[in-house]
Amino acid sequence: MLTNESLLTFNEIIGKPFYYLYRPVVQQQLIAILIAIFLAWLLTRWLKPWLQTLLPVEEEVAAPEVMYTQEFDEAKAEITDTTVALPEVKKPFFQQWWTYLIVPLPHLVFPTLCLLTVTIAYIVVGSFGGFVGLIDQFRLFLWVVFAYELFVGLLYAAFPTDTVRRYHKKLLRPLFVVLVLGSALNWIIDLNQLGQVVVFELFGNPVDVRALFLATVGVYLWLELVWGVQELAQQIIDRYTDTEAATIQASLTLARYVLIGVFLLFVFSEMQLSPTVVTALTGGLSAGFAFGSKDIVNNFISGIVLLFERSVRPGDTVEIDGTMGIVSAMSIRSTIVQGFDGREVIVPNEKILTSSVTTYTKSSRHARIKIDIGVSYDADLKQVLDILNRIPRQHKLVLDDPAPNAFLMEFGPSSVNFSLFAWVADLGQKVTTQQDLVLTIMDTFAQHNIEIPYAQQEIRLRDVPWEALAIRQSAASVGVQS
Amino acid sequence: MSNYFQLWVIVFIASLLTACGSASTEQNTPVPETLFVSHYWTSEHEEQMLQEAIDAFMRINPDVTVVMESSRRTGRDFAEQANAGLGADMLVGLPLEEVIPLAEAGLLQELSGYDIDTTEFRSQYLNAVRYQDRLYALPFMGKTSIMYYHKALTSTVPADLDELLETPDEAPVGIPVNFVAAFWGTQAFGTNLLGEEENVQLDLQSYVDWFEWLKEARNQPGIILDDEVFFLREKFISGELAYLIDSTDSLPQLKEVIDETDVGVSPLPSGAAGPASPLASLDVIAFNRAAAPAKIQAGLRLAEFLTNASQQQKLVLEETGHIPVNRTVTIRPRLSEAGSAMAKQGATSIAIPLDYVDAFNQIRRVGDEAYLQALEGDSDSIEAAIYLFHEAGQSY
């Protein structure tokens, strides 16, 4: 057991790398590494555009929106006896196996070239009898970078870009940097000893580097890691099970907060915050804390109640304060509702709990489509009913139960009016399905010469004093001339 | 990516320029030199001793700042660091046997070109640190075998092997008998390990005589022979043995578990041919080849300070079990009985030169077996000695 006096000080820790930097042999190696990296960077700049022309890598390929499914189109052709030209449906890029080879390539160009140039530097410096240990270690580091970039590239190939980008920037990259810095520092000093260096005292308890690291970087990485695991678990469960997405997200959110809470307790214990200190903290600050954080605590508790009660869940279509949209995320403080116009409304959880919220999807996500359509009085009404009943039955998104139905509703002033009712499984499918059906109905009616009449009005003028009107008009024109 | 890269390059170049700029200033105007020292001593007391010595050095050399830390706290192994040009400038207390791999890897600074006063070093230790006619290290302190006695059980100390045989049954003696631990006896019977050409050369007659003496000792009820010194040490601590031959570095442990005033220390008993010469393991001072010349110069000043008679005496008097390498160190028994014994034993101990470590290890491998044959097998002393010489490739 070492005494505190024998532990390293911050000056020693920070000073040592600079101390080494003054050594000529270290400077020589660093310059060699720097030149090698610079050359690799230049080569990358020159090579990457050329490589991209050879390999048209698309990192972000969105699946094209298919308005007409193949099956629906075939069914429609049966009705109309005509062939409608379909928009070309591209296969999703990421379904191709070779994308796993191509997508990581741009990520690997720089590390590969670095490895090449640094290896040349290693050979050249070594041939002159110079120290090469640092260059060799840097080469090893580059292999690690290579493996990391390969891993990231494969993630981009396998998963949606937006998701991976967040993983990459908020979790993987910081984690990688921390690991690299840690191993580099471990080269110079013993990290266990560094961890025991006392940085400051908190309420009489010494806070060492390890505890400080855990309380800052550790907490950040843990939050991101837990978030990452939650997202990953959600995607896997979504893909491979039939469990309702909203239920999964609520459960995973709860689990995330439990994990965060456990980690925070662990950090407190590492910071050696004794129960007395915690009591003193909470006791002394409780009054101010209570006033200042009333709303936060309200929202926090409301968030937990909402997650348990499941009255509103992620993915639900709701209407709050006149804003209709989908609950895109629920956090412990607020709920984000994404409006159909793209706006995101952040609603405090307390408000959802205490005010009335219209939900369209609480007990069922089914949605009903209603299409009103009028046809000419000259049309064959039975044929119209037949077409209106057959078209939705051929659409794969229209549910069989409840079955779609068309009804003759009324004799309108200009047309005979029908209403078509059909159900889709999810509210999100309503608009596109409705659009499909309307377009198909229009096409089919045209094929069968069924007219959809414009609104017509016939105006009849009776007992007009035409002569008096002509005299008044001529008098007015004379007055103007004089 | 490119923004990060550019930032990184700027910071890197700025750091390098700062470093280079300061270095050039250093050549023109004398600036205080900082020396980074890594030590290999393990106990807290030893570390404290070293720090005190270094503090004393800095008081009389205010232009040198020494930053010392334990080798256990420098992160990676020194060899790995030094290969990259990193690591401490100066290594203090490095075990001698670790010099060979470091020197062969070109990681230690060769010191022959420096103006070093080596006249005060004991010649056997200075010879030991030379490797392939080059000087890669300087002797610092050593450890060797010595005789401990329990003052509560006996008041006399046998001066020679005959007296040791005559110790009364009430004051038993524990003697470890493996090749290294019992090496001192062959020297007492006249072997000259390094021979005339400074090659490892054993003397057959000395071994025969020593084996004979051990056989005789084995039959004495008051003498216990064992190849495991640990077993004997336990008996000494429990008061079952009055005398124990053990390494000098056992002194702190013995003093800790036995009443400090009851632990007596004496040089090993001499033999017919002269004083006993146990093997010594040396701790040395070495320098990182990556260290700048100015650092090495400052380090050599520190090395000279640490090995001068005064500092060596101080370190011995701390009674951590180290023997001095400075030939001028003498300590009166009245000042410290243990220190005096350490200094005397240090004068007759021998260290295996680095050039002969391999040859010695080869002999050592069969040496233990020869002791077993002589003391526990059917072989007589001559057969056991011949077996040793034959197997070790020694002429006789």
Image: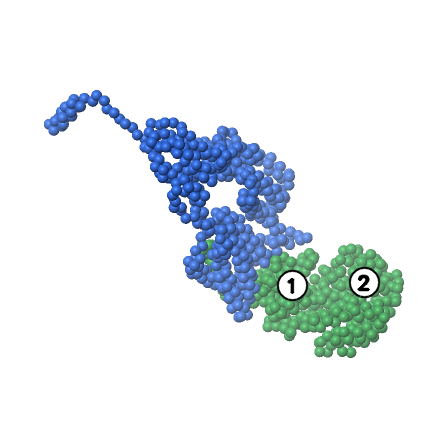
User: Who's the residue at 84% across and 58% down the image?
Assistant: B240
Q: Mark 2 — residue?
A: B244
Q: Amino acid at mark 1?
A: Val
Q: Colour of chain B?
A: green
User: Who's the residue at 39% across and 44% down the image?
Assistant: A83
User: Who's the residue at 50% across and 47% down the image?
Assistant: A163
Q: Secondary structure at mark 2?
A: strand
For residue A279, which quarter of the picture? top right
Residues at discs 2 and 1 both on one chain = yes
Kindly report the distance in space between the C-alpha atoms of the residues bearing marks 2 and 1. Answer: 30 Å
Q: Secondary structure at mark 1?
A: strand
Query: Which chain can be seen in blue?
Result: A
In the displayed structure, B125 sits above or below A208; it is below
Colouring chosen for the image of the structure: by chain
Local crowd size for mark 1, using a 10 Å CA cut-off: few (<14), some (14–19), many (≥20):
many
Q: In the image, residue A102 lies at what x, y percent?
A: 48, 56
Q: In the image, residue A132 lies at what x, y percent?
A: 55, 65
Q: Mark 1 — residue?
A: B92
Q: Is residue A12 left or right of residue A418?
A: right
